Image: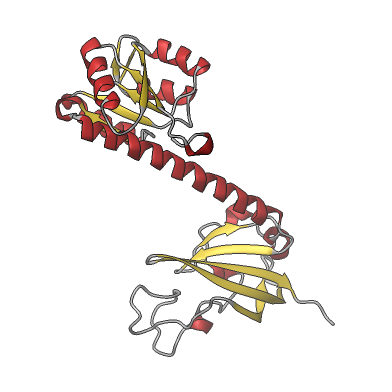
């Protein structure tokens, strides 16, 4: 943790564990690691919630078997009180299945007590904090993009390489006469007929953009592409539209965004 002027600040960990020996082990491992730490203890979920209301923490180490809570209910109660703090489940070997379920429910990582050592625990804590920060940064970025898309005056539609629509912004609704919920999952060809096929080479066999393999049926680049095309409304009426099509690649995954504006007479 970087404090003012780059000074390394102690990480604050809340360890929720009712076994005094396990509490001691956790504190010993963290205090004798390269990760400066201050460990605060709580024996029950109720005590942990009191701590969370009054003190800041960077990570929560949570046993799922406590005097006042058991299993995933333990996680749910703590998560509800501290949704932005990463949680590492620390539990017994026989609870590994529950620990995995806890990760699916939102815990960032888990450690099995019989296999726990300093390296394993510190790695899990570091990973949990970094993963939570990355998730929060992504969520904030997505929120900013969503706000821009939702308030844009032009129709903005995002679809995958098969043409399946993922985003249909508010400005697209009056332009095409469809509600967003009607269009999510539909083919973009429904409103922009030919937008997929027009970009295929003559050797194309299936109507989707940029196949994973560049051999046979590959598509020409569409990033960025501006042109005029015919668009279709829900009532079947067509109109001339100006479109700008761009591509986003994430490894082998491709998404496309088309901005559509009704063509006006000059």
Residue 183 shows up from this direction? no
Q: Which residue is located at x 68 percent, y 61 percent?
A: 172
The image quarter in which residue 33 lies: top left
Of all residues, the one furthest to the right in this rendering is 266
For the residue pair 83 and 19, the one nearer the viewer reads as 19
Please say if 32 is above or below 197: above
Please say if 54 is above or below 244: above
Residue 214 x/y as whole percent: 35, 80
For the residue pair 21 and 216, the one nearer the viewer reads as 21
Residue 150 shows up from this direction? yes
The image quarter in which residue 11 lies: top left
116 vs 264, left or right, is left
249 vs 260, left or right, is left
Please say if 121 is above or below 265: above
Mark count:
0
Please say if 53 is above or below 117: above
198 vs 39, left or right, is right
Q: Which residue is located at x 45 percent, y 25 percent?
A: 57
**Colour scheme employed for the rendering of this structure:** secondary structure
Residue 232 x/y as whole percent: 66, 72
For the residue pair 42 and 187, the one nearer the viewer reads as 42
Residue 167 x/y as whole percent: 57, 57
Q: Which residue is located at x 69 percent, y 67 percent?
A: 235
Could you tell me which quadrant the C terminus lies in? Answer: bottom right
Residue 9 x/y as whole percent: 44, 30
Could you tell me which quadrant the N terminus lies in? Answer: top left
């Amino acid at each position: 943790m970087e404090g003012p002027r780059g000074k390394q600040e102690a990480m604050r960990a809340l360890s929720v564990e009712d076994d005094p020996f396990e509490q001691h082990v956790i504190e010993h491992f963290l205090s004798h690691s390269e990760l400066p730490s201050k460990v605060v203890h709580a024996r029950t979920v109720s005590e942990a919630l009191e701590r969370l209301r009054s003190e800041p923490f960077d990570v929560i180490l949570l046993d799922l078997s406590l005097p006042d809570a058991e299993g995933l209910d333990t996680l749910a109660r703590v998560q509800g009180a501290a949704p932005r703090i990463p949680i590492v489940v620390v539990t017994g070997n026989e609870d590994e299945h529950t620990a995995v379920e806890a990760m699916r429910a939102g815990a960032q990582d888990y450690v099995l007590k019989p296999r726990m050592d300093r390296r394993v625990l510190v790695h899990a804590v570091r990973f949990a904090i970094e993963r939570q920060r990355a998730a929060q940064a992504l969520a904030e970025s997505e929120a900013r993009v969503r706000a821009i898309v939702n308030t844009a005056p032009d129709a903005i539609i995002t679809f995958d390489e098969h043409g399946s629509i993922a985003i249909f912004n508010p400005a697209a609704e009056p332009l095409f006469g469809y509600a967003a919920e009607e269009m999510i999952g539909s083919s973009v060809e429904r409103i922009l007929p030919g937008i997929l096929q027009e970009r295929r080479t003559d050797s194309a066999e299936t109507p989707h953009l940029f196949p994973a393999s560049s051999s046979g049926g590959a598509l020409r680049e569409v990033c960025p592409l501006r042109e005029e095309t015919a668009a279709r409304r829900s009532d079947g009426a067509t109109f001339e539209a100006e479109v700008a099509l761009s591509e986003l690649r994430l490894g082998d995954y491709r998404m496309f965004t088309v901005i559509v504006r009704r063509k006006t007479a000059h």
